[in-house]
Amino acid sequence: MAKEKRVGSLGPGNAFRNWLMDVLGGRIDDRNCPVNVYNIKPSSHTVCRYEFPNQGFSVVAKFYGKPTGWNRNYDPVHALENEFNILKRLEQIIEIPRLLAMNKDFHCALLTEYVEGRSLYEYMQRDDGLYDRLTAIAKVQRRLHDRTRSDYRKDRVFARFHRVLDQLGMDPLTRMKYNRLLGEWWYSPLLDRPFGCMVHGDANPMNYLFNHSKVFVLDLESSKEHAHFVHDLGLIAAELKHYFAIHRGNGNMAEPYIGHYLWRYSCNEPEFYAITRILPFFMGLGFLRMARLGMAPEHRAYILQEANACLKGGLRSQG
């Protein structure tokens, strides 16, 4: 769950503060007000909220030039421009925090409005209207996938999967087992598609924020085009099962929620059953993505066991 910590304030004369004031213009009545700074964690990059006291306004800056996660081998300027362009395109399709500006000179900062609300993860914790929240997310994802149709690149789907395996640093024997499983999935007709779409790519419960009747989608840096739409569904399903297994002691408790979520995404019964047959592949990917994070050895072992079970179980069901 994301947490904020106040780390200071910016006073008049600070160069970054001056840029903020220039971007926000007339939205800030008192241009001499202090600007409180809050660091938001966890995040793959340094992310800060800038609060303008008594102005009723905050903004969020994501600094691509200051990575904090596992991936530090990238071009921050390219990453900044890529997400800026993606957000410009998607703001006409789904609800996202309003895009304000970008600036390469301040550690490649991307500036958006701050949106208050509760994340899907918070609803999972409280078990508060979770079915309704999953319905809302399914509708948002359906709109994103339907309105970004493109050609489908199955090779890219598998390249991304192999990239995640590369990042896990597995021993050669374990890696060979995963390579064989992926080889079997490659030749399965289930993953063939007449068209692809854009997917969020990092569809985890922290990246869906509920503000009254709206669902805001956050952190689209990992979004991918020419993808398989079940990618996002598999990641959400893996997150649900992982949460109930770790925090409630029984991963099977997630099954009704996963079934409800997939049903609400589906247009009809045949599509629902087609999705359930493909889902294990992308749930496996979802678990392997989690395994990249720092965690206790027994926790990581559980996640790898679930990933392996998903990939094997999905293949057996095709027999």
Image: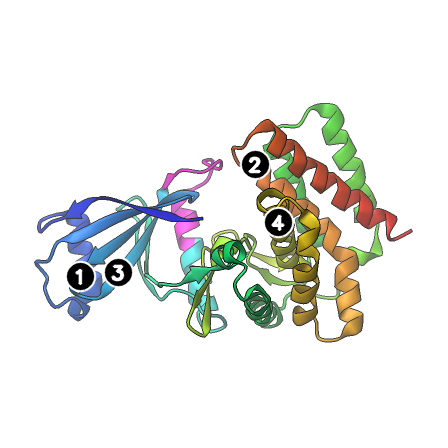
Query: Which residue lies under the disc numbered 2?
Result: 292
Q: Nearer the viewer, mark 1 or mark 4?
A: 4
User: In terms of secondary structure, where does tag 3 sit?
Assistant: strand
Whether residue 264 is visible, yes or no, is: yes
Q: In the image, what residue type sits under mark 3?
A: Ser
Measuring from the top left, give residue 64's x and y in whole percent: 37, 45
Query: Which residue lies under the disc numbered 3?
Result: 58
Measuring from the top left, give residue 30's x and y in whole percent: 10, 64
Q: In the image, what residue type sits under mark 4?
A: Phe
Q: Say which label, 1 or 4, has the lower sequence index.
A: 1
- Distance from disc 1 to disc 4, alpha carbons, whole Å, reads 46 Å
Q: Say which label, 2 or 3, has the lower sequence index.
A: 3
Q: Which dot marks residue 183?
A: none
Q: Which dot marks residue 244?
A: 4
- Distance from disc 2 to disc 4, alpha carbons, whole Å, reads 20 Å
Q: Nearer the viewer, mark 2 or mark 4?
A: 4
Q: Are marks 1 and 3 in contact (CB under 8 Å)?
A: no
From the viewer's perspective, tell me whether residue 281 is left or right of residue 63.
right
**Residue 67 is a magenta residue:** yes
Question: Quarter-wise, where is residue 209 in the image?
Answer: bottom left
Q: Say which label, 1 or 3, has the lower sequence index.
A: 1
